[in-house]
Image (tube, rainbow, N blue to C red):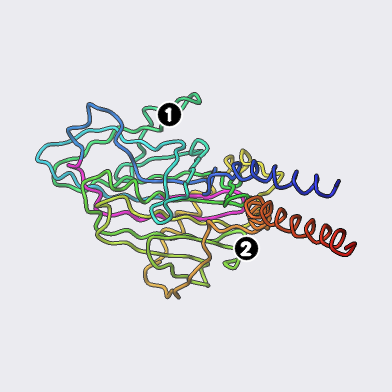
Amino acid sequence: MKKLIYFFGIVFFSIFLISNSAQPGVWNAGGSGSFTLLYPEDSIAYKKIQMKSEDIFMQLYKGFAVVKGNYYFKNTATDTLKIKVGYPVNNVFENIDFHHEVNHVRVDGLYKIRGLINDNEAPLIKKPNSEKDNWYVWEVSFPPQKITKFTVYFLVNTNNAKITEGYNSDKKNAFIYLIETGSIWKSPIESGNFYTQLKDNISLKNVKASSPNQLAYNKENTTLKFTLSDYGKKPDPNFIITYGKTISDFNFKEITLNSNVYFNTIDDFSKLKLNDISYTNVDLPNPYKVGGISNTSVGFLFYLGIYGLPILLIIFGITLLTILYKKFVRKK
């Protein structure tokens, strides 16, 4: 009788366990995307400024990432347009390729962020000063029919990410570049080059990634690359990369104290002739897939809860009939 009570208890509670499965996706990833138009008074410029191209350089370290982006904009209007552009501190984006997963990109304040307009330092006119304030903002003038270059540098913490899939989860370093946000500008973006260098002896075999185009790898420079062309007409798939494990005693504030060193390092990286070196195509594991047996265990309990009781009742009925048959028929 005790065994039966335990069995039914497991079946009963398994029903409640099923409802606790977490939203799948990559959470608390360090990341970045292109600039966003912010204010209603700038709506006159909406879709008049084309992002012609972008060159994005990312260096991944254990616990954090350094980013340098060169964005080239063209004002297609006949007048100078002055607008405010900004980076969000954090947001949640659905993955274009995997619609049931989400990307929670938390850039943790875009530490030590720097912006340059045509290689001249651009002052921030607004930066987050509370939990409700989500934007870093610059004001940029775009002369008519000319190219304006905007360069940005920053550090992000990648150490707090968690990848969930049902009841399984992995704590890893994760970085997301939100390519989909480029669709806010006048389309198309004619070309984009994206380079990700693995630093700190991070091994490619410990990397998982999802990219909007074929990834290629150069072993000598430990660099992953993909390119895009004629995109931004609609939200494009994002670049997601996970690597390593969470560092328990990681101190990101100490890293930010050396921001100039990291910015100089990524500057040197960006000046290499990265398009001229040879790459080999690679197919990396899906970053949304995680290890563990929790999903299998809960799945077993789920099916046990659905089919276990009827099967048990059938077995119980057959056993009872057998006992009654032996008890009464044999007596006769």
Q: Amino acid at mark 2?
A: Asn
In this orientation, does residue 226 appear? yes
Seen at 59% across and 42% down, the residue is: 19
Closest to the observer, 219 or 178: 178
Residue at the disc numbered 2: 201
Determine the image quadrant of residue 297: bottom right
Please state the extent of the stretch shown in magenta in the rendering: 47-68
Question: Which numbered disc flags the more N-terminal residue, 2 or 1?
Answer: 1
Residue 120 higher or lower than 232, as above or below? above
Q: Position of residue 282 (x, y in %)?
A: 47, 72
Does 2 sit left or right of 236 as displayed? right
Does 272 sit left or right of 253 as displayed? left
Q: Give the quarter of the figure containing the C terminus.
A: bottom right
The mark found on residue 233 in the picture is none
Residue 21: within the magenta? no
Residue at the disc numbered 1: 127
Q: Amino acid at mark 1?
A: Lys
Does 78 sit left or right of 196 as displayed? left
Closest to the observer, 317 or 223: 317
